[in-house]
Image (spheres, rainbow, N blue to C red):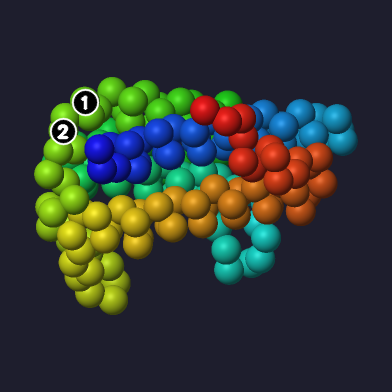
Amino acid sequence: MPLSMHRASVPVFVRALKVLATLLEKGEAHAKAQGWNPDDLVTARLADDMLPLSGQIQRASDASKGAVSRLTGLDAPPMADDETTFAQLQKRVADTLAYIQSVDPKAFEGSEDRTVELKTAGGTMTFTGEDYLLGFALPNFFFHIVTAYDLLRHKGVAIGKLDYLGPRG
């Protein structure tokens, strides 16, 4: 049986979002152990021209729920990008997981050939569903997951590669 679009997307997003929730837990615990206000870590950046931790979480959420929406034609829940605390970021991740996991795998049938158009400042990008998922959505999603990991690691959170990879299965 060939790999389905559902299998190539939803379980991948779910696993990484659960890892992200665990990384956030560790980040908050680290901040508290250091005597910092944990919510100050939410605004931390790797570089001045990069999004803060909150922005990385928001973009990972948007990338995953947007991919599911574009591939299935179903509306993703809007989220305001106004999170300023670890608790709000955890809720964002949980809400994203709930949406992604609620979508029936049958909704992905035929999505490999669906036309996906993304309007950007540079113009419109057009893909087949398969090319969009494999060449844009997944790389974009993982960019934001790994950037959140890197930011937390840079701030001294005791996480390593196995934390990023998460549990198997």
Residue at position x 19%, y 38% in the image: 108
Give above or below for 120 relative to 60.
below
Proximity of marks 2 and 1: CB atoms separated by less than 8 Å? yes
Q: Is residue 39 visible?
A: no
Task: Please tell me the numbered disc located at residue 104.
Answer: 1
Q: Which residue, as the protein is rendered here, is positioned at the far bottom?
A: 122
Left or right: 46 in relation to 31: left
Left or right: 146 in relation to 93: right
Q: Say which quarter of the image contains residue 46.
A: bottom right
**Mark 1 neighbour class, 10 Å CA radius: few under 14, some 14 to 19, many 20 or more:** few
Q: Amino acid at mark 1?
A: Asp
In space, the residues marked 2 and 1 are separated at their CA atoms by 6 Å
Q: Which residue is mark 2?
A: 107
Badge 1 element: loop
Residue at position x 45%, y 46% in the image: 60
Residue at position x 40%, y 28% in the image: 97
Q: Nearer the viewer, residue 80 or 137?
A: 137
